[in-house]
Image: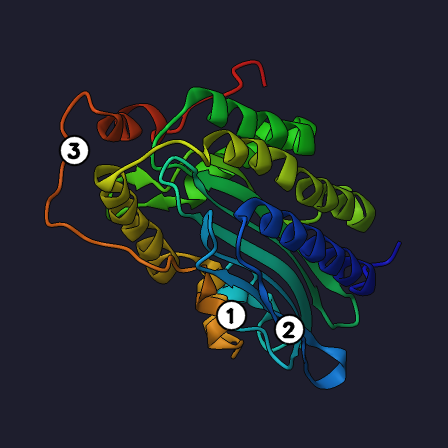
Amino acid sequence: MQPQISPVREYFITLQDAIVDALESLSGAGQFQSSDLPGPDGTLSRPRVLEDGEHIEKAAVQFTHSRGASLPDAATQRNPHLAGLGFQATAISLIVHPRNPYVPTTHANLRFFLVEADDPFWYFGGGFDMTPYYGFEEDARHWHEQALAATGDHYAKLKTACDDYFYLAHRNECRGVGGIFFDDWQEGGFDESFALTRRVGDHFLPAYRPIFERRVSAPYGERERDWQLYRRGRYAEFNLAIDRGTKYGLQSGRRVESVLASLPPMATWKYDYQPEPGTPEARLYTDFLPPRDWIPSA
């Protein structure tokens, strides 16, 4: 099949609806605010945002289909020969900030770029990653088992790419326990690349839902909540200072409310804070944030 944006757009919209329905069910009380914002030439933005739910403090599941006369800088850093060319892009991006500190935050993104030229240039990108506040071995293993199921022989490469991308150099730490990440993906041509992208999208809920359900009723108090808010600060730092998707969204003139919807609803910063050695909080740094082979045989 020649590269086409319409089947990718259709899949992303279907996936968005499925994830919104699942998260509403997990959240208990609380519903997504929904808007459909059509643009010129058949483009579309479908923001879906849940705030102040019973079990989900904030979640955003965004779909966009955009066109532009010239690619923004963030999209041409690795392909400077594409500067100045017209393009179409479609993407689904989601973030879940749970209320219970024992439930990890998660993020996923899938995207497709099609540059309009005599010889069309295209690529897929995306992945999913998980950011726990309290680490559990069984959760991290399950997450990576689903990532392996989605990507097969590509898992090791995409797992390493995820560890490398979601890294805060100024903190010398990874954002979480990783997952999978790919960009500029064209392996096997359009059909195989699209198939990989669909498998990643289809494995997100099987990866995250069991972990959410396992931890959502765990008792917690002020100590755990304070730690969650402190670690959310790292999330905000990454999204605002490092993330290419945020930079692309701002540079391409996308709706700012949608671009920044991934930020946590609350976060705190403490000066030179160090958790007490041997505590569950300290174990996050020693046992979970450093990159690990969660599936050694993969």
The quadrant where residue 80 appears: bottom right
Does the image show residue 5? yes
The answer to which of marks 3 and 1 sits earlier in the sequence is 1
Q: How crowded is mark 3: few (under 14 residues within 10 Å), some or many (20 or more)?
A: few
Label 1 close to label 2 by CB (< 8 Å):
yes
Q: Residues within 10 Å of mark 1 (few under 14, many from 20)?
A: many
Residue at the (31%, 58%) spot, across then down = 266
Between the residue at mark 2 and the residue at mark 3, the CA separation in whole angstroms equals 42 Å
Q: Residues within 10 Å of mark 2 (few under 14, many from 20)?
A: many
Q: Is residue 14 left or right of residue 200?
A: right
The vertical placement of 257 against 216, above or below, is: below
Q: Residue 45 got which mark?
A: 2
Q: At which x and y percent is residue 89?
A: 66, 67
Query: What amino acid is labelled 3 in the image?
Result: Pro
The answer to which of marks 1 and 2 sits earlier in the sequence is 2
Instruction: Identify the residue under disc 3.
Output: 275
Q: Is residue 295 left or right of residue 121?
A: left
Query: What amino acid is labelled 2 in the image?
Result: Ser
The vertical placement of 261 against 198, above or below, is: below
Between the residue at mark 1 and the residue at mark 2, the CA separation in whole angstroms equals 9 Å
Q: Quadrant of the C terminus?
A: top right
